[in-house]
Image (tube, rainbow, N blue to C red):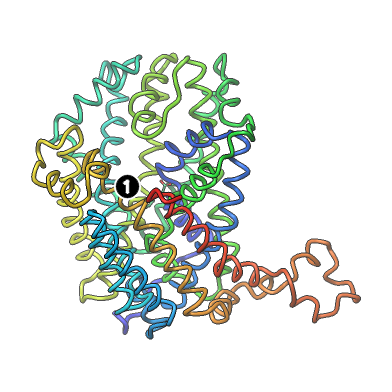
Amino acid sequence: MSDIQRENWGSKLGFILSVAGSAIGLGNIWRFPYIAGENGGGAFLVVYLACVLLVGLPIMVCELAIGRNAQTGAVGAFAKIFPGKSKLSRTLGVLTFFGGIVILFSNHIGSGLLVAGLGLAMIKWGFKSAGPLALIVAMIILSYYSVIGGWIIEYTVKSFQPNSFAQLETVPAAKDALIGFLGTPWRVVLWHFVFLGLSAAMLWGGIKGGIERWSKILLPMLFLLLLVVIIRSLTLPGASKGLTFLFHPDFSKLQPSVFLAAIGHSFYSLSLGMAISITYGSYQTKHDNLYSSALSVISLDTLGAILAGVAIFPAVFAMNMDPAAGTGLVFQVLPATFNRIPLGWLWSGLFFIMLAIAALTSAASLMECGVTFLLDHTKLKRHGAIILVYVIIGLFGVLSCVSILDWSNLEPVHKFLVRFFGETLANGDWLDFLDTFCNNFILPITALLTALFAGWAWTTRKATDELRMGAEKIADKNLLIWSAGLLDDEAYCAAAERHGLTFSSLWAFAIRYIAPLAIVAIFLSAIGLL
Ligand code: PHE
């Protein structure tokens, strides 16, 4: 592959819309509005924005810079930028290894082995371990994200079919319908493969002719559909209760756990820690300003999340339903809500199309990580790589399809999980297990390694050089003097411009200290130590 010119994005807008397409997904629609409503409304929004700016943005910038500098996907990128091992990674590796041994002897065999294994990997490969870990996580998440994507397609189709199960008006009835659907595994499997096929189709034409082209069509469509549903929702009598739920600031709810939820969600929502921004960054040219691109992405992502709340909760409250999150919201509360409104099939149909778009662009970004890996490290060409990822992840996803309602189809797997990870982790279904495992454990670890890698191994000194390319005009401007409008003032000589608060120095500080500390905090809370 190295002798062939690497493909590039066609335009800055296309790049931003593609990264935003990855970021805006189910998390924005079924998770964010509910977390916000439950955790202090407007007050939560302020906290969330702070987390996104202080932790999410620096890590996104960092992943893009790693990808662009290395011009290869996550697995090769760390090694290419910093082939050696650092003292820091070795020390962390040793600590992690012994941590794993302690966990092992406290009777958590599975977690202990995994943690000790991670420690050994860190000792042997240093920060390079983050690359494969991020790729594995992306592939695991794709395997079940696509299953839920399949449900969404089923509901989209059913919304337009008269008297179908997507047209019931009460939550218990909608719940029974959902269970009925999930209890027919062949349908779930079928739609899972269809959804994964659509993601593959998005990638088929390459970076510019595939992902970018489709993102430029689909993302504006998503926002347009959101606006249509928002207008319908806001014009219902009683809609304002929904807005109160979402926005009314209640500062008394801001417990430490809420801060952790905000950081955790900002990660998931921006698709960080799973190789995506590294992969997308690797197709980027040196002319682009990564600071402003990342800022545009996080703005679009946050806007998408807030608009989703405005589309959903006014309708839910106007129809006297209880708000919920996750599958309960999307497959039970919302169909019942929309179906109580005149022309219910239309609203529900439009909503599910929007949801399908959101899920599709995210799934495509996950799949591209696998495809880019194969392109960079094997002789396969794009189409072969896409087909291989499709088949492997498709088959792996079948496990999630057949075990949603109970474990009866996967009893041996269940027994294994209970034995190695304990009842709590193995309590839900396979999909739940993977979701908790990836989001609570692996994502924080890969994100932490990425931040430490850029801050201390690659060093902020070299990383800011990379970031300066394309951002020469703003990277080293003194932001205080700039925002005060004094940049041209002679009293502030050229020397003053380069010192103090600049994008470069703020980023470097955040990536060295703020991001790692914040990630360690969410990790400790996820494993119950905080
Ligand atoms: N960022 C996506 C969302 O908000 C989630 C996602 C997870 C996307 C994993 C891609 C990969 O839903």
**Residue at position x 63%, y 32% from top?**
250
Check mark 1 vs ligand 1: CB closer than 8 Å? yes or no. Answer: no
- Identified at 24% across, 20% down, the residue is 176
- Residue 49, percent from left and from top: 60, 48
In the picture of the structure, the residue carrying the numbered disc 1 is: 436
| Left or right of 382 on screen, residue 183 | left
Q: Is residue 92 above or below residue 214?
A: below
Q: Quadrant of residue 245?
A: top right
Residue 227 versus residue 408: which sits nearer the camera? 408
The residue sitting at 29% across, 30% down in the picture is 155
Nearer to me, 15 or 270: 270
Q: Dot 1 lies on which element?
A: helix
Q: Position of residue 455 (x, y in %)?
A: 52, 74
Residue 6 % position (x, y): 37, 76
Depicted 93 relative to depicted 232: above or below: below
Residue 518: x and y in percent read: 52, 57
Residue density around tag 1, few if under 14, some if 14–19, many if 20 or more, within 10 Å: some
Asked if residue 185 can be seen in this view, the reply is yes
Residue 195 visible to the viewer: no
* The N terminus, quarter of image: bottom left
- 333 versus 78 height, above or below: above
Q: Amino acid at mark 1?
A: Thr
Total marks in image: 1
